[in-house]
Amino acid sequence: MAGIRSPIAVVVGHVDVGKTLLLDKIRGTAVAYREPGMITQHIGMSFVPWGAVERFAGPLVDRLRLRGRIWIPGFLFIDTPGHAAFSNLRKRGGSVADVAVLVVDITSGLEEQGLESLNLIRARGVPFVIAANKLDRIYGWQSEENRPFLFAVERQEWHAVAQLEEQIGRLIDQLSRLGIEADRYDRVRDFATQVPIVPTSAVTGEGVADLLLVLAGVSQRFVSKERLTVRDGPARGVVMEVKEERGLGTVADVIIYDGVLRRGDTVVTAGLQGPITAKVKMLIVPKPLDEMRDPEDRYKYVDEVRAAVGVRIVGEGLEGVVPGAPIVAVEGSLEEAVKAVGEEIAAVKIESDKEGV
Ligand code: GDP
């Protein structure tokens, strides 16, 4: 059964710009506005269903004329913005992220690691939006919790708006010197050539509605349907983390972005010395919130998972697997899978040599 999955979104940017707090806000929104049964749980990713966004952002959905026009099921946000394998959209290998949110501090503009992320986003051709965060720190800004930016800006004193415009103007200039056309999102005329800037505050929640709606629009327009179509074939994914778990041995937390992974599957992934073959003994996902009886009892074992999903693999032979490595399930010949992983690693080597890492 093929279906359209949620785009995988990553939040990137310089340290301390508010990536973690912004993700917390977005996750909080998903939980507070969820429909019963709509939250699927993941390892390392958070599902934000479109229904929750629509409820949270209602009046803005109408204002931007988006009601009934969104066909993505929601977003899967990668939970660890500081993770080496994702903060720079996986230096090694293609990007697992379909879309990116580049967060900058509205009071200081693009900083060093932000610029690095930007360069990688562009090199990978990942569609992105810019969150100009810490809006509440604009002098004289009157905050109201969770208010959409578009409504908030209409309620401000002229001097606060002038300050805001000055900061956004600076950011636009800075980007323009890098050859990127950008504008405040409500002034963008052509999303194909201009990057939308959404002012946000991770503290007050202002602009978070705008950010999610703009991200949905950009995802639908610039991530191909082909890329978002999940097939029935063998799983393909990326390893996020490898660790020792008491009683389980070595486990790998992975993001599966296509296909189906089953208990008993043989998978090929990679370590520093090259491809590694492992056997999936167990698959673990968190329990849905409403099934969780006590905090000790957070996980459940499943027989199979379908993309896109974040899952913990208990397996034989996972020692030495490196975060960021590709992972594919074997269907047909083992050699083929080993070759596929080997090729991705080889492509990566060439790229990382080019990038000097
Ligand atoms: P990260 O390093 O990019 O993940 O940044 P954090 O989310 O850890 O935030 C860094 C600091 O900035 C923390 O002290 C946050 O409370 C603060 N911060 C984050 N977002 C905002 C915001 O929108 N407004 C204000 N005033 N502070 C913020």
Image: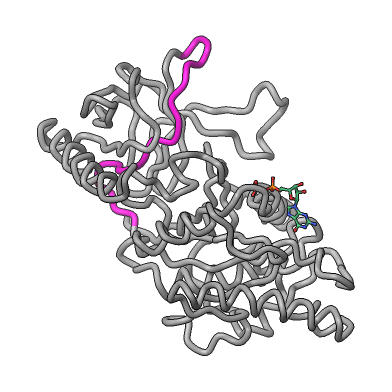
Q: Looking at the picture, does residue 178 appear above or below residue 120?
A: below
Which residue is painted at 42% across and 60% down in the image?
A: 119
User: Residue lying furthest bottom in this view?
Assistant: 189
Residue 70 drawn at (x, y percent):
52, 73
Nearest to the observer: residue 121 or residue 340: 121
Left or right: residue 112 versus residue 29 is left
Residue 66 drawn at (x, y percent):
59, 80
Q: Which of the image's four quarters has the N terminus?
A: bottom left
- Residue 143 visible at all: yes
284 in magenta: no
Residue 312 drawn at (x, y percent):
46, 30
Q: Looking at the picture, does residue 177 appear above or below residue 8?
A: below
Nearest to the observer: residue 71 or residue 1: 71
Which residue is painted at 37% across and 38% down in the image?
A: 324
240 in magenta: yes
- Residue 259 visible at all: no
Left or right: residue 277 versus residue 16 is left
Q: Which of the image's four quarters has the C terminus?
A: top left
Q: Looking at the picture, does residue 74 appear above or below residue 61?
A: above
Give the total number of marks visible in the rendering. Answer: 0
Q: Quadrant of residue 317?
A: top left
Residue 336 drawn at (x, y percent):
11, 37
Nearest to the observer: residue 15 or residue 279: 15
Nearest to the observer: residue 223 or residue 314: 223
Left or right: residue 253 versus residue 52 is left
The residue range painted magenta reads: 230-248
Which residue is painted at 66% across and 67% down in the image?
A: 132
Q: Quadrant of residue 289?
A: top right
Way the structure is coloured: one colour
Q: Looking at the picture, does residue 316 appear above or below residue 345?
A: above
